[in-house]
Image (cartoon, helix red, strand yellow):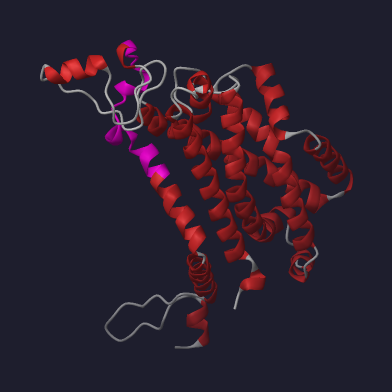
Amino acid sequence: MNLFSYKAGKAPIPPGGPAVPVPTEEEEYIARERFQFWHRFCENKTAVFGLVVLAIIILAAIFANLIADPNLVTFQDVYSRSVAPFAHSEAELERIAAGEDVVTHILGTDGYGRDIFARIVYGARSSLTIAFATIAISCLFGLLFGIGAGYFGGVLDTVVMRIVDVFMCLPPLLFSLSIVSALGNGMGNLILAVSITMTPFFTRVVRATVLTVSSMDYIEAARANGATHTHIILRHIIPNCLGPIIVEATISLSVMIMLAAGLSFIGMGVLPPSPEWGAMLSEAREFMRDAPWMVLAPGLVIMVTSLSFNLVGDGVRDALDPRLKK
């Protein structure tokens, strides 16, 4: 094999056979980095545990139709209100005695007779949709504003960062609440409010990374060779910003879950009767002394989901940290 055929990514054509593709040095480097990242991540047992729990929650949300009956989400049975887990009301016991099939409420029912387990499973769709949609929007605009401020600098940097400083002085929950109050209730407005609240945090992270990358020698070499701003940003700046963005995104997902649940708790999020974990907590407040399972079930799900996102975020941060590479 000669040197030129290796750089082209192809081996010499053997007699009587086609060329065998050979990975380039860049492809081998990317594959090696991915393997090392996954190996370092798997060494963190708590991060792997968080990833497994998140996978279970996401799969439950995707296959909710196979786990729980969708009719139980909004069906109100006035004769089966505040039923304890794995228990039955008097009306259900009579139907059982008559030979009828009765649904077993694994986590009990709420004050309207709705099945809590079904509402938690389908509520995962709302909560995770809000979390992932807000993280995508925040990352996108944070990337745009951060690159613009860090790479071009000057007046644009000053204006963007002063706006970011003003927004970051406001408490996230209060800022989101004011936006939802102005726009109105609903999942779309909730996603927009949380996205606006979290965008300044991503902007600051991206700008700090861009300032570091822009001072590297290979950026100056690219400029000296006549590379355009678009080429430098797409080829060098953005790939080097992905690591900090991924770390910030995974850690911020728990914050977004809590923000969405908090806004829904005070009635400024998802509209009823659509299930959402924060709204379920709000509806269960008046029953928490007589029926504590109404509060414990959605509260534990919110806590476990947020904790899992934090564990995964810490694992990703440690796996991407170059100081931990051996």
Queried whether the magenta region covers residue 299, the answer comes back as no
235 or 45, which lies in front? 45
Q: From which residue to which does the magenta span run?
A: 57-78
Q: Residue at x 49, y 24 (%)?
A: 289
Location of residue 260 in the rendering, given as x and y in whole percent from the top left corner: 58, 31
The image quarter in which residue 258 lies: top right
Give the quarter of the figure containing the N terminus. Answer: bottom left
Q: Residue at x 52, y 86 (%)?
A: 3
152 or 185, which lies in front? 185
153 or 255, which lies in front? 255
Location of residue 135 in the rendering, given as x and y in whole percent from the top left corner: 59, 41
Location of residue 285 in the rendering, given as x and y in whole percent from the top left corner: 53, 22
Q: Residue at x 17, y 16 (%)?
A: 95
* Picture layout, residue 303 above or below residue 177: below
303 or 221, which lies in front? 303
Give the residue at the far top of this rendering: 78
Q: Is the stretch drawn in magenta largely helix, strand or loop?
A: helix
Q: Residue at x 50, y 34 (%)?
A: 299
* Picture layout, residue 69 above or below residue 42: above
Location of residue 163 in the rendering, given as x and y in whole percent from the top left corner: 82, 36
The image quarter in which residue 180 lies: top right
